[in-house]
Each structure stands twice: as structure tokens, then as C-alpha cells.
Image (cartoon, rainbow, N blue to C red):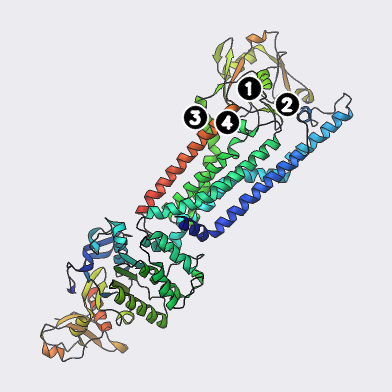
Amino acid sequence: MALGGGASTGTAALAAHGLSKRFKKKIALDKVDLSIPVGSVTALVGPNGAGKTTLIRVCMAFERPNAGGVEVDGVDPWKHRSEALRRVGYVPQTPAVYRGLSVEDHLSMARSLHSGFDSDYARRRLDQLGIPLDQRADTLSGGQAAQLGLAMALGTRAKVLLLDEPLANLDPLARREFIQVLLDAVKSDGSTALLSSHIVTDVEDACDRLAILGAGKVRLDCPLEEARQTHRLTEADSPPPGATAIGSFLGKGGKNIMTLWRLAPGDAAGEALETASLEDVVLGYLAAGRGTGLQLN
Amino acid sequence: MLSRIRLTLKQHRFETIAVTIVCVGLTVAALIEAYRLNSLNVPLSCLQSYQGGYMGPSQAPVTAAQAHCNELAKSFNDMRGSLDMNLVQLLLLFAPILAGIVVGAPLVAREIEQGTAPLSWALSGSRRRWLLGKVLAGVFLLAPLMLAVGLAANVLEGALNPGLNPYASFSNYLGRGVPDVFWALAAFAGTFALGTVLGRTMPAVVLALVVCFFVRATWDAGMTHFVLRQFAVQQVQQDQQQQQGYMVYGPGGPGNADMYVYYKSFIDGKEVTDAEVNAWYNQNMVCVPMPTQSASTSPADSSSPGASSSPGASSSPGAPATPDNSKMGDNGVACQGPNIDPSHMPQQVQYVIPGSWYWQTIAFESGLLLLGSLFCGAIAFVWVDRRRPY
């Protein structure tokens, strides 16, 4: 059961209810409940194989859920695919571009496929980044290809943006640029974004909400600030009074076993302790999910 | 939609350019070969009388005109049998299927292999509309190119068989003309359907090659046996055919514009089997070994009325009896029968599709190919809506 925000509300831009997806014997998503509020930028964090990509693919109607379902802006993508996809902008995991086509051709293709595609908007964004429209897409750098993918997603003027680890193959500068463009767009358009990544530091400055996915389950789903304020990290043998142990893992330097604690509301003593970094929060929940942490309490 | 068609052709530019070059090149090559044959200006009578040494050294004196005639006919036959002519004919035969496979295989499969399908499918609410744009691009590319190739093949067929009207004859009729377009479309539809189901280009190509060549190889026999048999009519008498201009010069001798479908044998008005015909001959004929030279015959003589280069117009089975009641047996064995009234000898009646039915037959078989294409296309359109884009 996920801690934090939890169940769907009427204002959710994206909501999953008891969503399960299985590939033969492997369970990719296990009764996932998730709610992404409108206007938020949510980091979907988890290790490789946690189910992040599967969750996004279900939202894109690329995968059919075995149980439960998702709603994108109130529409079930599996039942009403056209309707749902009209509301979604999607950036795939690897920057997939058509090798023989130019950047301008990509925008033309997007316009021919999506009736509401705003070519001028996408073109302006690419112009701002200095990406030549007549350049062949297969000669773009990784960062430029990712920006092209983002521009195509933004050009749909969709209410919900789903970004499947778009930063994974980018250098630090390109990552920062990508996130900046994304944030500008979300801010100006008032859209909602779900940004998946397995690298916490990539997304912690960009997002206002955190969802941790581990072994197919949602471990945490809450605002980023809440995640920071309600979690503390201590050495395993010094628990804050009244706190709930989440998980233990090897601390930096590999010397000490550290434990992540979730504070009870109004726990003044706990709040006095040093706050946990976002990376620690994620590590703590993932350790709990894997069952590799020390069992305390 | 036009924009999508343009972009699809640009996306598959290698296949587009390769198929265009091959088809245009083949069209030009076929026209050049036809021009070379036509420029010999060989009179039809020379081709029909040319014996090409089959009868051995003739004892009769040869006039200068006959010698010139034979020389022209020999040049014509040499050109017909030349390597470049055979190569062009071979390519004309396989070009539609190969072009269809080359254009169809990567249409969907490559998008899935290269990971671009999720990009397009996320943008397009309807995958079927997306696929339609791609399919139309393939059709717009293949149809005019294959029509050009088919028409050039018709011109070449006319040059190879002087006196033959390619539009009223079944000589090689499925390897030229309009059917080329439909063979290409069928191969195209089958291959892009395989690519959609398999999601891989090379396996789709290999499987399509196997399936397409199997269908092509068995099509003639299947059509003749199961379909055209229902429409075949009794062949008119040979002399009537000649009067009507059906007689043409075909490979190895005069051929027939009609498509031979099947035959029936009769003895004294009663339908009999081949075994009964053979039994009749064994009972009534006496066979003795004969010198090879006298037992052999010219191609013109040995060819039955149904013989031509058309796959469906193969030689009629059985050894026909000659008017003097002798029957040419195998391996230089000549059979001399008793003096029987020819009207009591086994009679063979051939059933054919007349050459005058060319367009109806073409329309029918092209329609069947089109139906097959639509069926394959329907599979792809259903499958693309259900499959994963990776």
C-alpha cells in the first residue's frame, strides 16, 4: 500500500486504480493505485524493471492491463484510445527518430497524424534551441533528438505529458536543458507531466511530486516537499521515537547501515533530526520493497 | 494524406529508389529487346517454314530466297534464345513479386524494429489511418511502375511471337500486362501483413519469398484445374482457327492463342480414359523400331494445336495419330496400324479458354489477386490495432 497522496481524486490528470500487468509469470505492475494531480510535475522513480515503462505504456494503450485500469484526463485509453491519445503527449524511452527524414519532416508527419498538432509552437521551441529544421534527424545529437521528441510531444498541446526516461542517454548539460524546456512548457500551458527516471538527482529539481515504484508496486506517492519533511535518515541503531522504519540500506562510503524513518505527525523530536535527501528517501523505499533492508521495529 | 504518402516514400527512400530504378530499367530493357527483334523484319512465313536443321540436311535444292529467309529466321531464333533476352524475360517474370516484397516488408516491420512506431502511434489516434497512409504510398509507387513493366512485357511478347496479339492470347499471359500490377500488389499486401504480424523485416522478407513463389508456381495449375475448367469450351477445328487468325508462331513452332485447359478422349463416340486409349492402340497397332532420323519430326509437326509458350497452353497429352494411321511412338518407335477407318480411331477433344476471352480472364484472375491482397491487407489492419509497437 502506497503511503502519501494515495487514491484518485476528481482532479487527477492521470489515475491508476488497482492496475496490474503481468508478462507471463513476471508481474510488472501489482495493483497499482496512483493519482497525479492536474498541473503537477511528478517524478516516477524506481530501479530498472520496477514497472515505470509498463505503467506509461498502459497509459498509452500500448499494453492492456490484466486487472484494474488507468484514466488519462478521465478517459480510459484502452477503451477509448483515440480520445485518450488526443490528451497525451508522449516522449519514448530512446529518442526514436526517422532516419531519412529532416526535423521539419518530423513536424509535418506529426501534423498529418495529429489534427491538433501545433507546428508553429513546436518549431518555435526548436528554433529557441538552435536546432536546424532542415537537418536530418539521424544526424542530431542525443540531446537534440530528445528535444525533437519533446517538441513533438509539446506540439500536440496535450493536457498530460508522459516522458519515459527521456534523460537516460543525455549528458548533464542536455538534461538540464531538457528539463528547463519541459518546465517552461508545463508552466505556460498548465499541463501535467509524469517524468520517469531511475536517477533521482535528474528529477528532484524539476518535479513537485514524487512517486516511487518498486517491484511493480507504488511505494510512495506524495508531494516532493512532504517526502522531504516527513522522512529522516539515521544509523540503524538510533531510531527516532514514534517513527516508522521504512527500510535500511548501506550508507555512503559503505560503512554504516542507514535506516529511513517516516515521522509521525507532530513528531517534534524527529523533526529536529537532519532531513533525508530525496535519494535517501527513494533508497529507503526501494530497500523496503526488495526486502533487503534490516527489519526494525 | 498526401503529406503522409510523401513522407512515407521519403522514409523508405532506399526501397523507393531501388524499385523505381529496377522497374524503369526493366521497362527500357524490354522495349529495347522488342525493338531489336522487330528490327529484323522477319516475315512470318520465314519463321513458320524455318526448319533450323531439325530435319537434317535437306535433299531439296534451296533457293536464294529460301536461304535468305532461313538466315533471317535463324537470326531471330538466336536473338530469342540469347542470354540478355532470357535475362530480361526472367526479370520480367519475377519483378512484380520482388518489387512488392521489397516495398512491403519494411512498411510496418521497420517502424517496430527501429522504435519509431510508438512515436507515430502516440501521435495518431487511429493506427489504421496511420497504416492506410503507408499502404497508399506503396500502392501509388507500385501500380504505375508495374503497369509500365507489364505493358513493356506485352510489347516484348508481341515481338517474340510475331503474329500474336498479346491482348488476345494466353501466351505467358500472367507474366505481362495488367496482371503484373496485381501480382505486385498481392506480394506487397502479403508482405506488409507479414511484417505487421512478425514485427521484423528479414523474417517477413524470407517468409514472403517462400509464400509468394509457392503461390506463383501453383497459380496456373490451380486456376486451370479448379476454376477455368468450369468455363472452358470445346476447341474449334484447326483449319477454322487458321482462317480466324488464331494461328500464331510460338516457341518451337506454330502455337495457339487459346489456353488449353483439358481434353476428353472418345472412341466411337464414347468417352474413354487415357488407359483405354492406350489399350486400344496396343491392341490395334504394331510398333517396330525405326531409325531415329525418320522417327523424329520438326517442331511444327510435333506440336499439338494447344502448344504455345503459355503455361496453361501445354501440349496435349498422348501421341496423336497421323492421318495415315501411323502413330509416332517414343524413342524412335513407329507404329503402323491396320487399315482402320479414321472415324473409328480414338478422338481427342480439347477444351480451351479462347484467346478472344483474354480481357475477361485477365479481369477475373486480377480480381482474385486483388481479393487476396485485400484479405492480407485486412489482416494487417486488424493486427496493427492490437499489436504492441515494439
Residue located beneath label 4 in the image: B358
- Which secondary structure, mark 4? helix
Q: Is residue A229 above or below residue A19?
A: below
Residue located beneath label 2 in the image: B300
Sequence-first tag of 4 and 1: 1
User: Which residue is drawn at the image coordinates 15% and 92% (left, top)?
Assistant: A272
- Give the position of the C terminus of chain B as an image quadrant: bottom left
Badge 3 density bin: few <14, some 14–19, many ≥20, Cα 10 Å: few
Task: Name the quadrant containing residue B387.
Answer: bottom left
Q: Position of residue A234 (x, y in %)?
A: 20, 88
Answer left or right for A18 relative to B130: left
Report the chain holding disc 3.
B
User: Depth-wise, is mark 3 or mark 4 nearer the camera?
Assistant: 4
Badge 1 density bin: few <14, some 14–19, many ≥20, Cα 10 Å: few
**Total marks placed:** 4
Badge 2 density bin: few <14, some 14–19, many ≥20, Cα 10 Å: many
- Which secondary structure, mark 2? helix
Q: Is residue A184 above or below residue A97?
A: below
Q: Amino acid at mark 4?
A: Tyr
Sequence-first tag of 3 and 2: 3
Residue located beneath label 1 in the image: B318
